[in-house]
Amino acid sequence: MSNTDFALAVEDLTVSFDGFKAIDALTLYIDRNELRVIIGPNGAGKTTLLDLICGKTRATGGSIKFKNQELSRMAEHQRVRLGIGRKFQTPSIYENLSVFQNMEVSYPAGRSVFGALAFKCTAEVKARVQVVAEDIGLGDKLDTEAGLLSHGQKQWLEIGMLLMQEPELLLLDEPIAGMSARERELTAELLQRICKNRAVIVIEHDMEFVKRIAHKVTVMHQGKILAEGAMDQVQADPRVIEVYLGH
């Protein structure tokens, strides 16, 4: 496979903070329509890797290619426009707006100079909100004030706000933290649905959940990749058991 066939090609990526290599010559390839889960002990560099991909942190060396375009010198907003969506650990939704309004304001109207000026809540936006709301399981909650949603529903709404922009790569940092068992189950189904037409990278600690959703698992340790493959294979790897699963 040539690099152009991947949704994301990370090669020899390095970032140093005061001489400490948080990410150390890391190479990672994500296929189109793949749901990849990244696991590893705290301090392994998982969140830093997402920061590098979305542009929150600048790499010291190496290459990040998305849709065959080099990202490493691109600003964060340019990467969003290219089709990268990132969800952080704490949901950032507009609590006093309805679910519908939260999604409406996330619609990328400002992609052209006139888009923002001419923008009205058109049939197109309404249709898009409806489709995404069904996808995230909030189809019957469009008029509900976002602040009244459960913790899990807020997380789904935030994923929905990202989906409004039709990203081709979605980065999710611990999406099920603090969720009930039922919400975790629904989130697993949601993630399986949304990776049908985009690549999704998830950072997660809950091994049962990882087992349910991952196409492939990457184990990070000290800024490097320790192991990669199917969940069963990774779980049986003695090095992974030693540094991570054994604790």
Image: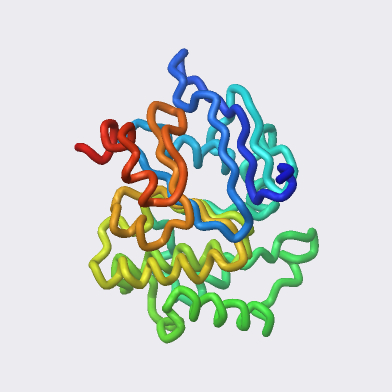
79 sits left or right of 104 in the view: right
Q: Residue at x 50, y 20 (%)?
A: 16
Q: Quadrant of residue 126?
A: bottom right
Does the image show residue 239?
yes
Q: Quadrant of residue 93?
A: bottom left
197 sits left or right of 139 in the view: right
Q: Position of residue 230 (x, y in %)?
A: 43, 51
Q: Residue at x 39, y 57 (%)?
A: 91
Q: From the viewer's side, name the closer residue of 54 and 119.
A: 54
Q: Residue at x 74, y 67 (%)?
A: 117
Specify how the rendered protein is coloured.
Answer: rainbow
Q: From the viewer's side, name the closer residue of 231 and 38.
A: 231
133 sits left or right of 12 in the view: left
Q: Is residue 42 above or below residue 78?
A: above
Q: Position of residue 116 (x, y in %)?
A: 72, 64
Q: Position of residue 55 (x, y in %)?
A: 58, 39
Q: Is residue 227 above or below residue 96?
A: above
Q: Residue at x 58, y 48 (%)?
A: 30
Q: Quadrant of the C terminus?
A: top left
Does the image show residue 89?
no
Q: From the viewer's side, name the closer residue of 240 and 183.
A: 240
Q: Position of residue 97 (x, y in %)?
A: 44, 71
Q: Residue furthest left?
A: 247
